Image: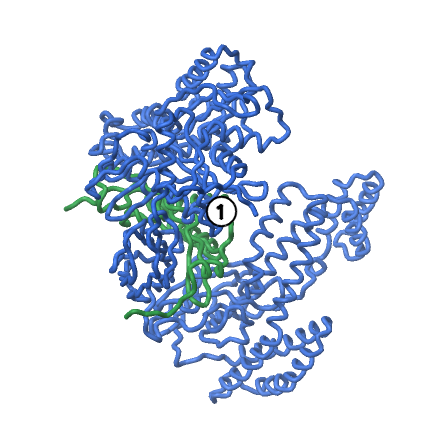
Chain colours: A blue, B green
């Protein structure tokens, strides 16, 4: 059994992180709501009776300092405390740090609740400050807290990453330049142990200052040149200034530009503003890397001075150092690295991720420390007797906000609750649990809003209850008949399969009334005056079905007779679909460019089934039956073949009956036949749909295996990444019931394979041979002959690049029908 | 009113949705550009036929599951985790969005239960206390 601590926490002045060592690697946990973010800003907010820790709290730190506290780590171990207006009491740095530590516990997604942890502290922390950090750990519910100095943690992260490096008898510098603070420390191995020999720092220097300087020194002078402003900078920085908004916007844009400049040599800041005379100014301010470097040079040099101070104090020359290890987000800036290297004359080491190196090192250290829980110093856990929750809320709402109320039975003292929306858009923060609670929950419009309801003890350990989720459908009436019972889809020609496919217009459960737009291409030309037509067919039923299995609800034909000019293949048609509350469907077609407009309203009481469309559909159904049968035969699926055979008789009967219908038939036969047709189609679907998906899943596995081999053997990085991305998302399409999704992905894999094969000699030669076999069909025989001769020479000379060119050119000489192997059938004329 | 009907846990429901584990950054970058073009066109009252192209591109992204939302003018407080905010001016109550630097991008999933979405890019905005008339 693993009895090691394994959990490490970087409790930073500006940001904190948590990580776990597991089987040789370290996982840095991510924020449960903010996708991909590992960092938790060390800021605590006590606004509106809720406690919020992290990024949302930081947003209020500057403007509401009476209720939001940041940078409290610097006060650790002092008697100073922070008055919180909303609470009417003070909080000590230890209590505030405990809030951060507790919040970090919610990052752990492994279901564990660690009782032992390693927490990092700055090199400059004395005994009192160190003990205060331990106390914060206990207050957060940990029973064992082991401390580790940050520069040592960073060094451990490096040593574990570069396992072959020999650090014996050496010393190095850890240079830590973060968002708001700078620390530098001399680390040495003394008798086999890492020790900090000396350190220096500046608590008010970091990347955020660089953003301010970009705005002050580059953007504002540029703006002054372009427009009329009086004391622009002051107007921007003052809370009541006319341009205060612009200040914050520019800081954001400057930060983005700064990040871009780490990867590129230039970036731009683009925005619009009105000057004092009301003249609009569109600003596009390019910033080069050298301009940026010039404005940060002085402060980077000042960090080098602090570093040199350490060297002088310890009678060291730069050459005595093994390297300078770069840590902290601002060391991503190439100039910082370059300048330190220049000023010291020794290489800087960028071997570790500067943002999470400290927490990774802490986790490595934790993996070497045994769990040893003796006398429990932590606060007693809150009583966690059975908590029962009775809730009351509307499950359907038309409002943007809905009240959630609950009666809580059991001992609630010392407990908190927290509600988060599953789309990651809402977090109530921690709120005290009371016998009665109430919360206004904001709702996402037209969606199912799902909230997690969790109860925590005073150490942020999860307390089990009998209620855990709130589900509210916004925009949906809790009355039958207001929601669409089935999907409505548009029938389109599928140019890949020669069949039709359904394009979803309104999904099942859409709230009425609703409106949608689609843009389609004309797939067959319609001559004006002819009887040819484009068919806009709307069907009701699952959008994965073949359309013949769904109910037709709307039909609009654009006939050549109604056109004033020819409708060419590829012409775009804009379609608008409107569905009223009483489910009247209005379809409007607008032919581009500036063509005629067609529209039709369908009501649910009137089902339009034109005879010519019905007969076409029946023919199509008969063809489909045969096709499915052939396929089942080739798969040796005799059970299906037999069942499909049973449908043959009914299809033939329907076919004969439909053919006898006259175009203007006024009886209800057409409706009867349509119903008949649909039932047969549904049966075919039932027999084959599952099989198709199954077959496609198997196909996917085969092409994936084949592609993996080929990509590993001959693929480049880009192709490897492409395949990796498809594999990473395969659970999404393999679980889908939509065959088209699967087909699209299979095609994508085929494309990757083809790209690779196109570079391999065997494939190129094979392809060439196949083309040569079809030499008689080439459009230009003379050119083909020359190309074939050239191809042969290229094969002899092993010049496959040129052989590839020959192949492409030969392929282009094939007649169109040789290139398109599938016979195209147009049913709707749109795709 | 106290409905004891057990619903699926949030984790179970999230798992059942087909949300890609990683959204390619380039897709978000293109959507952000599309949003900017749309804003510029609206501001300059650009040609209507360009708006049609924009709306087609939006439709194409919607088909892929991506939709964006312009939070301009929306109320905002510390519980809104779909917005990355900077507060301008002096007040911190009754905040509304006054500048949108990046829109909120959501990945939308539809199944038999209806529409679900998840925030894949938080909106980057400047907010300000609502001015009392």
In the image, A316 versus B91, the foreground residue is A316
Residue drawn at (45%, 17%), measured in percent from left and top?
A307
Residue at image mark 1: B27
The quarter of the rendered structure image containing the C terminus of chain A is bottom right
Q: Is residue B4 or residue B128 the one in the foreground?
A: B4
Image quadrant where residue A405 sits: bottom left
Name which residue lies at 23% across and 25% down.
Answer: A231
Q: What secondary structure is found at the residue carrying circle 1? A: helix
What is the residue that sits farthest to the left in this orientation? B133
Q: Vertically, is A591 above or below A640?
A: above
Name the residue rendered at 43%, 15% in the picture. A305
Q: Is residue A556 left or right of residue A245?
A: right
Q: Is residue A817 visible?
A: yes
Let me know if residue A561 appears in the view. no
Q: Position of residue A745 (x, y in %)?
A: 60, 56
Q: Residue furthest front?
A: A375
Q: A52 or B72, which is in the foreground?
A: A52
Q: Position of residue A280 (x, y in %)?
A: 29, 35
With respect to residue A668, does A154 lie above or below? above
Q: Could you tell whether A643 is left or right of A135 in the image?
A: right
Q: Chain of mark 1?
A: B
Q: Is residue A639 left or right of residue A339?
A: right
Percent x, y of residue A468 = 38, 60
Picture coordinates of residue A699 (x, y %)? 67, 61
**Quadrant position of residue A39:** top left
Q: Callout 1: 10 Å neighbours few (<14), some, many (20+)?
A: few
């Amino acid at each position: 059994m693993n009895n090691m601590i394994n959990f490490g926490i970087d409790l930073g002045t500006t940001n904190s992180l948590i990580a776990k060592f597991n089987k040789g690697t370290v996982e840095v946990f991510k924020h449960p709501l903010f996708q991909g973010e590992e960092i938790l800003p060390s800021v605590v907010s006590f606004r509106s009776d809720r406690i919020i820790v992290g990024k949302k709290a930081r947003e209020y730190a500057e403007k509401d300092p009476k209720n939001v506290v940041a940078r409290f780590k610097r006060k650790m171990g002092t008697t100073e405390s922070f008055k919180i207006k909303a609470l009417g009491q003070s909080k000590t740095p230890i209590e505030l740090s405990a809030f951060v530590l507790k919040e970090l516990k919610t990052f752990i997604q492994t279901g564990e609740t660690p009782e032992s942890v390693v927490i990092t502290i700055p090199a400059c922390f004395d005994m009192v400050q160190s003990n205060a950090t331990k106390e914060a750990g206990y207050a957060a519910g940990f029973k064992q807290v082991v401390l580790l100095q940050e520069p040592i943690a960073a060094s451990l992260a490096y040593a574990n990453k570069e396992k072959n490096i020999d650090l014996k008898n050496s010393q190095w510098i850890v240079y830590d330049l973060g968002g708001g603070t700078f620390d530098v420390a001399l680390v040495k191995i003394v008798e086999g142990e890492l020790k900090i020999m000396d350190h220096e720092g500046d608590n008010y220097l970091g990347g955020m200052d660089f953003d301010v300087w970009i705005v002050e020194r580059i953007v504002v002078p540029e703006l002054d040149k372009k427009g009329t402003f009086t004391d622009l900078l002051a107007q921007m920085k003052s809370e009541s200034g006319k341009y205060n908004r612009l200040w914050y916007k520019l800081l954001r844009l400057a930060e983005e530009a700064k990040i871009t400049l780490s990867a590129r040599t230039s970036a731009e800041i683009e925005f619009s503003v009105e000057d004092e005379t009301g003249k609009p100014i569109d600003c596009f301010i390019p910033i080069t890397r050298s301009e940026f470097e010039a404005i940060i040079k002085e402060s980077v040099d000042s960090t080098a001075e602090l570093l040199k101070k350490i060297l002088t104090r310890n009678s060291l020359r730069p050459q005595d150092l093994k390297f300078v290890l770069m840590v902290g987000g601002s060391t991503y800036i190439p100039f910082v690295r370059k300048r330190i290297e220049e000023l010291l004359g020794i290489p800087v080491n960028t071997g570790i991720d500067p943002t999470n190196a400290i927490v990774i090192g802490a986790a490595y250290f934790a993996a070497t420390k045994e769990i040893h829980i003796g006398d429990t110093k932590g606060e007693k856990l809150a009583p966690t007797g059975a908590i029962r929750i009775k809730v009351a809320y509307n499950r359907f709402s038309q409002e943007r906000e809905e009240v959630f109320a609950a009666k809580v039975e059991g001992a609630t003292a010392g407990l908190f609750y927290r509600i988060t929306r599953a789309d990651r858009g809402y977090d109530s923060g921690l709120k005290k649990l009371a016998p009665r609670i109430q919360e206004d929950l904001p709702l996402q419009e037209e969606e199912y809003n799902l909230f997690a309801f969790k109860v925590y003890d005073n150490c942020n350990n999860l307390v089990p209850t009998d209620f855990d989720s709130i589900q509210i459908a916004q925009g949906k009436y809790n009355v039958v008949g207001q929601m669409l019972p089935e999907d409505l889809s548009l029938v389109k020609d599928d140019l890949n399969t020669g069949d039709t496919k359904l394009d979803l217009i309104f999904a099942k459960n859409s709230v009425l009334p609703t409106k949608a737009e689609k843009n389609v291409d004309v797939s067959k030309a319609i001559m004006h005056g002819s009887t040819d037509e484009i068919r806009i067919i709307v069907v009701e039923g699952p959008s994965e079905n073949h359309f013949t299995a769904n109910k037709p609800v709307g039909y609009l034909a654009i006939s050549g007779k109604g056109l004033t000019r020819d409708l060419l293949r590829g012409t775009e048609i804009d379609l608008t679909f409107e569905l009223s509350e009483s489910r009247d469907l209005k379809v409007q077609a607008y032919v581009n460019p500036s063509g005629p407009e067609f529209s039709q309203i369908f009501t649910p009481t009137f089902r339009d089934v034109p005879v010519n469309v019905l007969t076409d559909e029946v023919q199509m159904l008969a063809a489909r039956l045969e096709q499915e049968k052939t396929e089942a035969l080739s798969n040796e699926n005799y059970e299906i073949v037999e069942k499909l055979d049973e449908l043959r008789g009914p299809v033939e009967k329907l076919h004969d009956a439909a053919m006898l219908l006259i175009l203007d038939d006024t009886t209800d036969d057409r409706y009867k036949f349509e119903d008949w047709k649909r039932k047969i189609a549904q049966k075919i679907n039932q027999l084959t749909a599952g099989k198709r998906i199954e077959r496609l899943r198997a196909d996917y596995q085969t092409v994936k295996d084949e592609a993996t081999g080929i990509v590993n053997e001959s693929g480049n990085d880009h192709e490897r990444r492409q395949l990796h991305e498809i594999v990473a998302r395969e659970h999404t399409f393999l679980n889908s019931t939509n065959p088209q999704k699967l087909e699209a992905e299979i095609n994508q894999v085929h494309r990757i394979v083809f790209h690779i094969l196109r570079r391999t000699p065997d494939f190129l030669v094979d392809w060439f041979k196949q083309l040569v076999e079809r030499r008689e069909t080439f459009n230009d025989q003379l050119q083909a002959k020359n190309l074939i001769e050239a191809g042969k020479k290229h094969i002899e000379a092993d010049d496959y690049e040129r052989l590839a060119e020959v192949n492409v050119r030969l392929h282009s000489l094939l007649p169109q029908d040789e290139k398109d192997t599938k016979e195209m059938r147009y049913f709707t004329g749109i795709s | 009113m106290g409905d004891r009907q057990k619903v699926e846990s949030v984790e179970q429901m999230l798992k059942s949705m087909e949300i890609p584990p990683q959204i390619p950054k380039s897709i978000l970058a293109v959507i952000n550009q599309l949003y900017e073009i749309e804003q510029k066109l609206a501001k300059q009252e650009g040609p209507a036929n360009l708006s049609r192209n924009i709306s087609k591109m939006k439709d194409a992204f919607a088909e892929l599951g991506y939709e964006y939302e312009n939070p301009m003018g929306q109320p905002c407080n510390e519980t809104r985790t779909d917005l990355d905010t900077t507060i301008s001016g002096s007040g911190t109550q009754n905040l509304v969005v006054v500048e949108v630097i990046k829109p909120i991008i959501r990945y939308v999933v539809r199944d038999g239960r209806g529409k679900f979405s998840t925030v894949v890019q938080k909106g980057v905005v400047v907010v300000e206390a609502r001015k009392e008339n």
